[in-house]
Image (tube, rainbow, N blue to C red):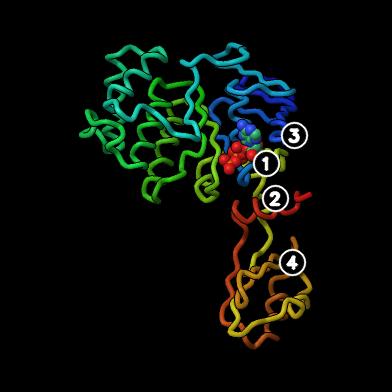
């Protein structure tokens, strides 16, 4: 891997086995300063394990993790330099919100007055300034998550790890979180996040790392993944009566077919397929009630790649 000066983190051939389960197998990736980098993978893929390895919460069996924060090579960044939103949320439920935020920021090197000011600005931004004196446990789950997010970034770390930042949030709060993440990135924080919500990741990340069963499936620019896998047409077809799968096999350019239910099917065409010819072949089916054609989003590409990498 080319270790040029913009690289903030390099990971080479990282592996971790729990008892007899290989949670992470030989993965390599790197982040540049300023990146928004997303870890994607189904449940159990090894995302959280990888994030914990990076933070030295658990030890790798093998591999290299190397950081270069603010021009300084280090094996592990200090708590001032890094922020972490863990998958299992948990601050101090009994303490007033503002006290918790100020306390956490000061142990990460911030002056108490500056921490209080920055905390109030963030609380204002997320619409919780009037609740600053309340106990954390008095807030809803989504609002508690906002506080935990603020706690992870208040000290303006150079690098932040957000494990599942969107989980448990309603669509409005998810949108707001996208804006918060973009904002801290604009202010200079490099971001590594793990998530399941592909449409959100598509709007946020510049680079993605796809993993499944501990293994690397794709690592690179989001634009590259669309260039490589995003050209195929996907047809969602509805029928008024049941159609046996064999009948649809007459479609010359069909690559794969998934029945969503007895009356609806999703057909992925081969790269470079002739859409007109496929539609004309579909003309033989008199029971079609609707056809929608679209090109794959990250969600579709992800499902396809995971399927291709099944053992
Ligand atoms: N402490 C542990 N002891 C034993 N096995 C573990 C432990 N933590 C994780 N695993 C296993 O390692 C694999 C990877 O888990 P991990 O939590 O890293 O996945 P993930 O991609 O973060 O999943 P999710 O999206 O569900 O959070 C899983 O098979 C999991 O059961």
Mark 2 CB near ligand 1 (8 Å cut): no
Q: Earlier in the sequence, mark 3 or mark 2?
A: 3
> Of circles 3 and 2, which is in front?
3
Query: Above or below — where is 81 with respect to 138?
Result: above
Quadrant in which ligand 1 is drawn: top right
Q: Is residue 220 left or right of residue 109?
A: right
**Crowding near the residue tagged with mark 2, few <14, some 14–19, many ≥20 C-alpha atoms within 10 Å:** some
Give x and y (percent) for residue 40: 61, 42
> Of circles 4 and 2, which is in front?
2
**Crowding near the residue tagged with mark 1, few <14, some 14–19, many ≥20 C-alpha atoms within 10 Å:** many
Closer-to-camera residue (146/66): 146
> Of circles 4 and 3, which is in front?
3
Q: Is residue 21 left or right of residue 200?
A: right
Disc sitting over residue 306 in the figure:
2
Disc sitting over residue 20 in the figure:
3
* Secondary structure at numbered mark 2: helix
Quadrant (top left/top right/bottom left/bottom right) for the N terminus: top right
Disc sitting over residue 273 in the figure:
4
Residue 208 in sight here: no
Q: Is residue 95 left or right of residue 257?
A: left
Disc sitting over residue 121 in the figure:
none
Q: Give the Cα distance between marks 1 and 4.
A: 28 Å
Give x and y (percent) for residue 46: 65, 37
Kindly identify the residue that appears in the image at 41 percent across and 33 percent down.
Answer: 183
Whether the residues at callouts 3 and 2 have beta carbons within 8 Å, the answer is no
State which quadrant residue 126 falls in: top left
Disc sitting over residue 211 in the figure:
1
* Secondary structure at numbered mark 3: loop
Q: Earlier in the sequence, mark 4 or mark 3?
A: 3
């Amino acid at each position: 891997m080319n270790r040029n000066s913009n690289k903030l983190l390099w990971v080479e051939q990282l592996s971790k086995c729990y008892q007899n389960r290989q949670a992470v197998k030989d993965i390599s990736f790197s982040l540049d300063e300023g990146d928004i980098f997303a870890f994607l993978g189904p449940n159990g893929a090894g995302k959280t394990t990888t994030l914990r390895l990076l933070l030295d919460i658990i030890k790798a069996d093998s591999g290299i993790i190397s950081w270069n924060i603010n021009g300084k090579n280090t094996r592990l960044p200090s708590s001032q330099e890094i922020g972490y939103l863990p998958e299992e949320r948990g601050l101090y439920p009994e303490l007033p919100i503002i006290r918790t935020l100020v306390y956490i920021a000061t142990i990460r090197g911030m002056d108490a007055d500056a921490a209080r000011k920055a905390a109030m600005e963030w609380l204002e931004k997320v619409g919780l300034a009037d609740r600053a004196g309340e106990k954390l446990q008095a807030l809803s789950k989504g609002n508690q998550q906002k506080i935990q997010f603020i706690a992870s970034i208040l000290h303006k770390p150079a690098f932040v790890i957000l494990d599942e930042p969107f989980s448990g949030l309603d669509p409005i709060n998810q949108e707001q979180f996208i804006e918060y993440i973009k904002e801290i990135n604009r202010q200079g924080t490099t971001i590594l996040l793990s998530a399941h919500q592909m449409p959100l990741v598509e709007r946020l990340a510049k680079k993605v790392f796809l993993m499944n069963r501990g293994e690397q499936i794709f690592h690179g620019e989001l634009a590259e993944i669309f260039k490589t896998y995003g050209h195929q047409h996907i047809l969602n077809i509805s029928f008024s009566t049941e159609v046996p799968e064999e009948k649809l096999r007459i479609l010359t350019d069909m690559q794969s077919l998934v029945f969503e239910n007895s009356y609806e099917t999703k057909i992925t065409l081969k790269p470079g397929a002739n859409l007109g010819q496929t539609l004309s072949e579909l003309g033989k089916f008199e029971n079609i009630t609707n056809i929608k054609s679209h090109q794959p989003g990250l969600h579709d590409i992800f499902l396809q790649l995971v399927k291709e990498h099944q053992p």
